[in-house]
Amino acid sequence: GFLYMDYVLRFFDYSNFKGWPNKIEEVTYHWGKDKDRFIEEVKRKKIDVLIGNIPATAYETFREIARALPNVRFVPSLDTQFSNKSKENVTRFAWKYNLPIPKTYIYYHRENADKFLKKTNYPKIVKKSYGPSNYGGYFVHKVDSYKEAKALYASKKYHPMYFQDFIPMEADIRVMLIGHKPVCAFWRRAPKGEWLTNTSQGGSMDYMDVPKNVLELAVRTSKAAKAEYWACDVAYGKDGKVRILECATAFAAFPYIRDWIGQYLMWSLSEGRFRKPHMPMFNWEELGKISPNLLRTMRHITFGKYSASYDGSYFGSQKKSYGEGTVYLHELDESYPIFDVKERTSEEWPSEKWNYQDKFKLKSIKSMKVPALKEQEPPEVSGDESAEELVEESAILNKLD
Ligand SMILES: Nc1ncnc2c1ncn2[C@@H]1O[C@H](COP(=O)(O)OP(=O)(O)O)[C@@H](O)[C@H]1O
Ligand SMILES: [Mg+2]
């Protein structure tokens, strides 16, 4: 079945699952108190697999819904969608898996944050943690001094207080993956003299020569999230290092990419009765030459696989400079295989532990007090969590391979 939400743009529909032999149901979540009705409808329709993205504001409710439906597989799983909820969650996910990110500070204890902001160095980037990922840089601010930070927090009242070291960067790169294989990637550069790279803020994009270390980091991140499909934004620093800025299962994608996800899921769920889509590495450099208006209308794009005896396979005969050397594109397809992401039954990020946001809520915006602080210590950034080694991309072992 498809998991839909009222007022939320639909990522999938039937046309993405062309040829699926069984009936595909739909269940729509109506905002408000709709949990029990929703659970009943899923049961009544005898749904085994529920496919769809859950927006931030419904995330905790859906963790409860998923518990009430232990025999329903959510795709992507609630654990995979953990990063959809907040920037804090993205950060905690990255900390757990040693994925490089800008050095990040998260404070529920506002006085402690203030003490820290007095003595730290600037610039810092202040962000609103909670809310749908990718508000186009609207809730992201650069502060150059303690005075500016204090003034910003006084007017914006973001909670928790979430901020990062400022990373001077060339550009950031969006990578989309299916079964841990990169299927599309592009650079986003800030307008001249600016630091925000969001395209909605006038940034430009291009598809050429996305570096190896960026693709590798994206794959590690997707594997850590056990994501059937995934997107991440990687900051390409002026120091040449790569760091995750954002990652989520919900992202804007051309319809042909959603077709590929549908085909991938049909292959995975049918245990091979449907064919795995072939999505050659760096296909985006070629498809990116097509005007976006045309690309938006193109559906079910397929490529022939490389075979040694057939010289008509474009992606088999092309060489590309990659990393330190030059490789055939079809060789890269072997380095970046499509993984079959399997169902998991345990919870990796249970809300009892990880929903700090509700546990350490403000009493009111006016008082700016956090009542729960009397009984419990919030998980503050500590020396080891924000450790410098987390930004060193090369030295880290990939635990997931
Ligand atoms: N730590 C940082 N240092 C420098 N620039 C940053 C940093 N974090 C974010 N940015 C810039 O701000 C943009 C928006 O930040 P992001 O975390 O992606 O939030 P949003 O949800 O608004 O897209 C990024 O694309 C990047 O250009
Ligand atoms: Mg962003």
Image (spheres, rainbow, N blue to C red):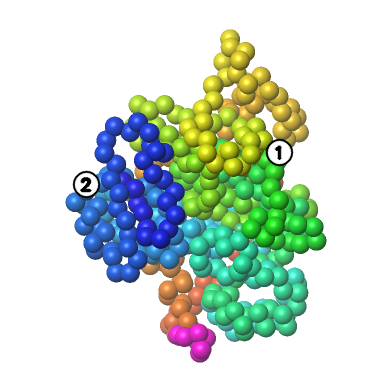
Residue on which disc 1 sits: 208
Q: In which quarter of the image is residue 217?
A: top right
Residue 243 in the image, given as x and y percentages of width and height: 66, 53
Crowding at mark 2 (Cα within 10 Å: few <14, some 14-19, many 20+): few
Residue 194 placement, left or right of 338: right
Give the mark nearest the N terminus, 1 or 2.
2
Relative depth, front residue between 35 and 224: 35
Secondary structure mostly seen in the magenta stretch: loop
- Say what secondary structure mark 2 lies in: loop
Whether pointer 1 and pointer 2 mark residues with C-beta atoms closer than 8 Å, the reply is no
Residue on which disc 2 sits: 46
Name the residue located 24 percent from the left edge and 63 percent from the top edge: 36
The Cα–Cα distance between marks 1 and 2, rounded to whole angstroms, is: 46 Å
Residue 132 in the image, given as x and y percentages of width and height: 50, 62
The type of residue carrying mark 1 is: Met
Q: In which quarter of the image is the C terminus?
A: top right
Name the residue located 46 percent from the left edge and 71 percent from the top edge: 356
Name the residue located 53 percent from the left edge and 76 percent from the top edge: 159
| Magenta range | 363-369
Q: Does the magenta stretch include residue 366?
A: yes
